[in-house]
Amino acid sequence: MAEVAIKKRHLIDVRDCNGEPDQALLEIRYRKIRILPPIGKWKRYPPLELTVIHAEEATAPRNRKKISWKLITDLPVNSGRAAVEKLEWYAMRWKIEVALNENTGRILWHDATRHVQQFLATHSRTAGGSNRI
């Protein structure tokens, strides 16, 4: 993508390695590509017209890793504004996925704890009041 001209610069809010607010200036490039289906499947599948969006910081910051995002989409990207829109959608999706993963772990732990408690309660009653399982 280095040969593609920068189509837009976009400032975003991020967090540094200490969790402190920071900003990053992204240089956004995009270009259309055409992906052919595997040999032997050309008759069943058409070529895909996709757009590659590359958002990257020009220089590495001191207090966090340099941002370098690469997205591939089949949605139309005809301007720098449209590319930023797709990046924002992806960022929101990523936040949702991270939140779901964090909460799923908590839910699973809570369920497992509850199941262990039920198991212990059931088996301690069947063992004649003894705490042995």
Image (cartoon, helix red, strand yellow):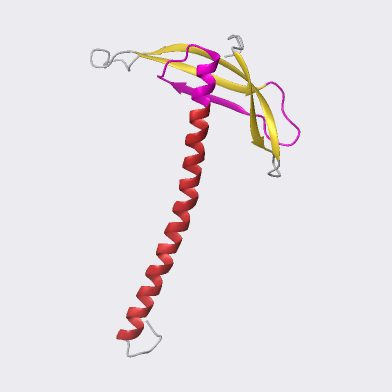
| Most distant residue in the left direction | 44
Residue occupying image coordinates x 47% and y 41%? 97
Residue 45 image position (x, y, % from top left): 27, 16
Above or below, comparing residue 67 to residue 39 in the picture: below
Q: Is residue 90 left or right of residue 57?
A: left
Which x, y percent locates residue 53? Answer: 52, 19
4 or 44: which is nearer to us?
A: 4
Residue 59, picture quadrant:
top right
Q: Position of residue 29 (x, y in %)?
A: 57, 15
Q: Position of residue 70 (x, y in %)?
A: 53, 24
| Front residue of 71 and 41 | 71
Instruction: Answer whether residue 29 is magenta in the image.
Output: no
Q: Residue at x 38, y 77 (%)?
A: 120
**Where does the C terminus fall, quadrant-wise?**
bottom left
> In the rendered structure, which segment of residues is drawn in magenta?
58-87
Q: How many marks?
A: 0
Q: Is residue 129 left or right of residue 14?
A: left
Q: Residue at x 53, y 14 (%)?
A: 30
Up the image or down, 85 lies above or below 46; here it is below
Is residue 82 part of the magenta span, yes or no?
A: yes
Above or below 94: residue 111: below
Please name the residue shown 46% across and 22% down the image: 72
Q: Looking at the figure, which quarter contains the N terminus?
A: top right
Determine the residue located farthest toward the right in the rendered image.
62
